[in-house]
Image (cartoon, rainbow, N blue to C red):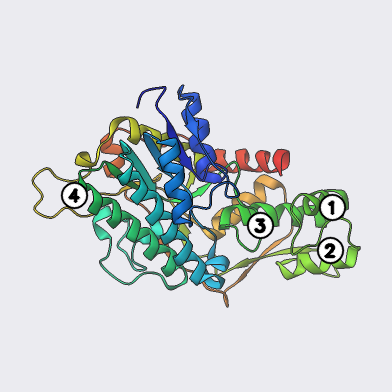
Amino acid sequence: MHKDAKIYVAGHRGLVGSALVKNLMSRGYHNIVSRSHSQLDLTDTAAVAQFFATEKPQYVFLAAAKVGGIVANTNYRAEFIHENLMIQNNVIHQSYLHQVQKMLFLGSTCIYPKNCPQPMQEDYLLTDTLEYTNEPYAIAKIAGIKMCESYNLQYGTNFISVMPTNLYGPNDNFDLEKSHVLPALIRKIHLGKALEQQDWKAIDNDLDRLPIEGVDGSRKEQEKRSILKKYGISQAPSGEVGVGIWGSGAPKREFLWSEDMADACVFIMENINFMDTYPKHSTEVRNTHINIGTGQEISIAELAEDIKTKLGFQGKLIFDDTKPDGTMRKLTDVSKLNALGWKHKITLGQGIEKIYKWYNENQ
């Protein structure tokens, strides 16, 4: 990519998109185009077509998506498949029609089967049943991969798909109903610590910045205790505070700092083409996507304990094994990406400290 090339980052305000914009700017790319959802609804086919016709971007990062944790995926199945398919169909097709030089489509490692062999290699795609709770989202992302492959093979486009592991970082979603596990644990344990210290100023500040079901810091103490309890943050008569966590804590997950993910994506856009993503003499071109991750995993219980220690919470972590665990392991095989020349830099321990600092300063 030339430094003055016009680059469209779809979803620039989210966890992924904001990290991409930051990385691009740090590398000297200055002609970056973006639109907020209110300015451009990517599910609106006519609006997306008009945008591409007017702006004519040369490169596209498709980071816009409807995303969420296990609760959101369970409750909003229809929205997850419909909105993601609409976004992908519109952006990928218009990228083809308007001769975008290269596009990067971002998915997720939830595309792999529920009982996938570990670590998960790109070739394990579509070899077994998906995990039920996020099946609609996963199917949408698989469709995006196949759409990119199909357009490349039929039209000669240069569309690359990458599948990042679980991400966390600046501009993460800390909404307790819709957030992923790591930011949810950060916020719940932060609130648990404030409750055990009877630091109502900290609780009020947190609720004012991000109300829970409309409950902010101005509400009466009993209302605030009630909403915290609903989300698993409660205080026993003895004074001990407990933080409830969905599932048994046994599942293992891999986590990648979002700015590392962005660095990998820009590296791929600068150095890798579609032809580099599959064996040269393949008779069938499949599984051209690239995993992005660390290749390291940790159990949810261990993660919660690490966050508890780093935040200084003295209370109790309570795992609710009546709630679904989801897939028991989701470890990516990153040998393909490493062989292409990229490896992650930020450890999970460093990342937890960085995201908690960001949460305190920006939420």
Read off the residue under disc 1. Answer: 204
Report the Cα–Cα distance between label 4 and label 1.
55 Å
Judged from this view, the residue extending furthest toward the bottom is 322
Read off the residue under disc 2. Answer: 224
Element on which disc 2 rests: helix
Is 162 placed left or right of 185 in the picture?
left
Q: Residues within 10 Å of mark 3 (few under 14, many from 20)?
A: some
Which is nearer the eye, 56 or 243?
Answer: 56
Which is nearer the eye, 291 or 199?
Answer: 291
Percent from the top left, x then y, of residue 66?
A: 51, 58
Report the Cα–Cα distance between label 2 and label 4.
56 Å
| Numbered tag placed on residue 175 in the rendering | 3
Q: Earlier in the sequence, mark 1 or mark 3?
A: 3
Q: Residues within 10 Å of mark 4 (few under 14, many from 20)?
A: few
Q: Quadrant of the C terminus?
A: top right
Q: Residues within 10 Å of mark 1 (few under 14, many from 20)?
A: many
Instruction: Identify which amino acid the numbered label 4 is placed on.
Output: Leu
Q: Earlier in the sequence, mark 4 or mark 1?
A: 4
Report the Cα–Cα distance between label 2 and label 3.
16 Å
Number of residue marks: 4
Q: Earlier in the sequence, mark 2 or mark 1?
A: 1
Read off the residue under disc 4. Answer: 153
Q: Is residue 108 visible?
A: no
Q: Quadrant of the N terminus?
A: top left
